[in-house]
Amino acid sequence: MATAAPQPAQLRIVHYPDPALRLKCKPVGAIDDRIRAIAARMIELMHEADGVGLAAPQVALDLRMFVAHPDRQDPDGARVFINPVLSNPSSSTGEHEEGCLSIPGVFGQITRPLAITVQALDLDGKPFTLTSDQLPARVWQHETDHLDGVLIIDRMTPMDRQVNKVALKEMERAGSRE
């Protein structure tokens, strides 16, 4: 999968089992107008799908970037994370139900560190660092998993995998027909 993608306006959210979801993404080089347009389209798609985050592999791009808007009450809260790096995970973890825009209708209890720090570049190429022990921490971890080809189904408990088995099989069958 190359980063030479369709025009940003043509980007769509891909669904499991699309192979793009399993890619280990390449770092973004130059932050140019194309990257800015991709980020803007990803924010549109995330909002249209009523999501709180969307990673580049979810639109079939192998770029290390995601968008997030965990506080939907803040109209200006959507943020772009380019080449994100997570650090300082808390030793305490918590389980919380997660879903994924690329695996619609599938939910599971996912255990993650409660707090984390993320370092990334913004659309101007300026580095920033954020730390959270709230919903943003979970969103950053979920989206960074996507950049490494990891899905929530890989982190689910065996019970949640069993509960979602039929839905996942149906998606796999539908994906093989495309």
Image (cartoon, rainbow, N blue to C red):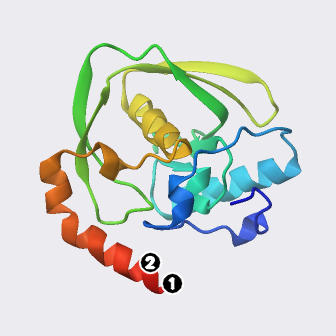
Mark 1: amino acid: Glu
Number of marks: 2
Residue hosting label 1: 178
The part of the image, by quadrant, that contains residue 168 is bottom left
Q: Position of residue 12 (x, y in %)?
A: 60, 69
Q: Nearer the viewer, residue 22 or 8?
A: 22
In this rendering, would 162 be left or right of 140?
Answer: left
What crowding class fits label 1: few (fewer than 14 Cα within 10 Å), some (14-19), or many (20 or more)?
few
In this rendering, would 156 be left or right of 52?
Answer: left
Q: Are marks 2 and 1 in contact (CB under 8 Å)?
A: yes
Q: Nearer the viewer, residue 47 or 145?
A: 145
* Element at label 1: loop
Residue hosting label 2: 175
Mark 2: amino acid: Gly
Q: Residue at x 40, y 49 (%)?
A: 151
Q: Position of residue 127 (x, y in %)?
A: 73, 22
Find residue 44 and name its label.
none
